[in-house]
Amino acid sequence: MLITHLHRFCTPFSISISSSSLYTHLFRLPKTRLPIAKTLCCTAYSTLSAARLVSIPDSPSSISVASEDTTLEARHHLLIPEEAQIEIPVEKLFIPPETDVSSGSAPLSTRVLKGSNIVLSRYARDALIAQAEFVKSSTRTEDCPSDGLPEFALVGRSNVGKSSLLNSLVRRKRLALTSKKPGKTQLINHFRINDSWYLVDLPGYGYAAAPHELRVDWDKFTKDYFVNRSTLVSVFLLIDASIPAKKIDLEYASWLGENQIPMTLIFTKCDKRKKKKNGGKRPEENVQDFQELIREFFQAAPPWIMTSSVTNQGRDEILLHMAQLRNYWLKH
Ligand code: GDP
């Protein structure tokens, strides 16, 4: 189980950590030693030139060879409107394990991934996706691949943009051909990336039309996976940022928090910026509201990233975040 890997984690200040969660240690970092101002803007750039990303071209074959080699900095000129910037208090940043926050290192404000609250750590490497292939669909956790590779599970309400995000991450038009209609068999779909880790597509939840039994069944099915899948590094919970928080999403996030399942919030559809007449909010406002509503269920702020499958906003950031979680997980 993941949590057993985390007991050995120590901060650069040699604070011993007994927490069972990847995230709960964060509030123990000595805040007074952070060499930064009270708030940071989430549009900071990474200075890790070693963290390189490569995309794979659209291709019907299962194996693609990296053809593009662009530094992270070069790819970070995504258009995020000025008004979409969020001021993030230091205590709401996600500071990964073994991140040096001492005054000797680069200022924290330059290491926050754009459109997120995530600080880059020295584990942010090998973020490229050079190869992606569908491996199998499983109906039970015990039927999932048993090769011990680390994995990230994408989950969210139906229509949240999960298939679009998965396809955008691997740069394929239709890699994610998951069963979408309620009533069909619910499957855990494994996609192997670079022969070294998995992206896992879980069935969407919250179909208004789904019968009660199916919803209960879905709950049992996915929660069993979250609790028992020992190679699960983090759940990526997708939330539609173009609409106000939904009760079912809040329930889901709080369940993950209460059960100490490592979770990253992926806010989707952040390109939808038209404010509705009836008091609708902009994506960044919905992002902040959502976090306020789940705050009590987390000992420390969970990591979050704003994304759009239309503009590709957040794609590189997701891959870097996955890389640093994965590399830390592999080492411990
Ligand atoms: P899923 O049911 O969660 O797999 O959602 P899909 O990926 O099928 O997307 C549902 C709908 O939302 C489709 O009409 C998509 O075109 C649209 N959509 C998905 N992602 C985005 C996004 O980032 N921005 C916008 N504007 N629309 C999106």
Image: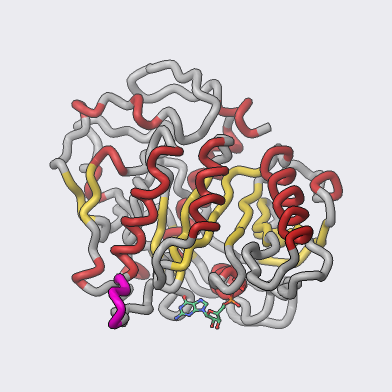
* The stretch drawn in magenta includes residue 164: no
Is residue 167 at least partly visible in the picture? no
Please tell me whether the stretch drawn in magenta is mainly helix, strand or loop.
loop
Whole-percent x and y of residue 33?
21, 27
Q: Residue furthest left?
A: 37
Q: Determine the residue positioned at 75% across, 66% down.
A: 211
**Which of the 4 quarters of the picture holds residue 142?**
top right
Whole-percent x and y of residue 77?
30, 72
270 displayed left or right of 202: left
If the image is split into quadrants, where does the N terminus sit?
A: top right
Closer to us: 35 or 18: 18
Closer to us: 1 or 179: 179
Q: Determine the residue positioned at 77% across, 54% down.
A: 217
**Which of the 4 quarters of the picture holds residue 231?**
top right
Q: Determine the residue positioned at 60% across, 30% down.
A: 3
84 displayed left or right of 95: left
Is residue 58 at least partly visible in the picture? yes
Classify 205 as above or below 242.
Answer: above
Classify 17 as above or below 232.
Answer: above
Whole-percent x and y of residue 99?
37, 35
**Where on the image, by quarter, is ligand 1?**
bottom right
- In this picture the colour scheme is secondary structure
Q: Which residues are magenta?
A: 277-281
Whole-percent x and y of residue 219?
70, 51
Q: How many marks?
A: 0
**Which of the 4 quarters of the picture holds residue 193?**
bottom right
* The stretch drawn in magenta includes residue 278: yes
Q: Determine the residue positioned at 75% across, 71% down.
A: 182
If the image is split into quadrants, where does the C terminus sit?
A: top right
